Image (cartoon, helix red, strand yellow):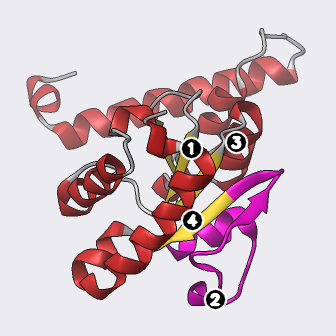
Amino acid sequence: MGSNVQNDPGSIKNEFIRIVRDFSQYLACQKETGNIFPGISEKSQDIINNWGGKINARQAFLHEGPENAPVFILDSETGFFKGDSGKLLTKILMAMNLTPDAVFICNAAAPESVRKKIKSVSPKVIITLGTDACQSLLNIRQPFEKIQGKFHEFCGIKVMPTFHPSLLLKQPEYKRQVWEDMKKVIKYAGLNNGS
């Protein structure tokens, strides 16, 4: 490579793409001739199959917190405890005798990953924040206002749909409803004892 290529990020990217394509063609030729390579992980195969296409960030399964937490939060967004809505969520949890590191929180973008995680960890209660989170988990297509604030079930686990903190920042009149929802969660999960 010339010195101009080394300093030009666009050229470096194009060179990298060329190398990967050449390697992919090499692997394809090896496969056609019957040379067998060790298997690769499903994640690696997915990356190879989608190479050059746009990455769909909405499908990423993002999560944090202990998997054995009794409270599982399914968020319509991915910032979790960041920004103003994250600060408000932290305040809500503190009022419930919880801290952000005492709950398991994930995004709703990859429903199959969410369902698989819930089945594997079996939390005591699930809180869905916002319409997307609720509908992706429960497959309920009714207006959110009709299902919000009432316990539902997913695989025998109680689910409480409530408004997302980002909505509360725009429409503070919903804060009272969210607190009423959280009081039901507190009572059901026995959080008033600090457990």
Q: Is residue 131 magenta?
A: yes
Query: Quick one: SS at disc 4?
Result: helix
Mark nearer the N terminus (1 vs 4): 4
Residue type at mark 2: give it: Lys
Q: Would you say the residues marked 2 and 3 are in contact, meaning their CB atoms lie under 8 Å apart?
A: no
Mark nearer the N terminus (3 vs 1): 3
Report the side of 164 relative to 8 (left or right): right
The residue at the point 50 percent across, 71 percent down is: 162
- Residues under labels 2 and 3: Cα distance? 24 Å
Q: Residues within 10 Å of mark 4 (few under 14, many from 20)?
A: many
Residue 166 visible to an observer of this rendering: yes
Residue with the mark numbered 4? 133
Residue located farthest toward the right when viewing the structure as drawn? 34
Residue with the mark numbered 3? 118
Query: Quick one: SS at disc 1?
Result: loop
**Between 195 and 131, which is closer to the camera in this rendering?**
195
Residue with the mark numbered 1? 190
Determine whether 139 is above or below 16 in the image. Answer: below
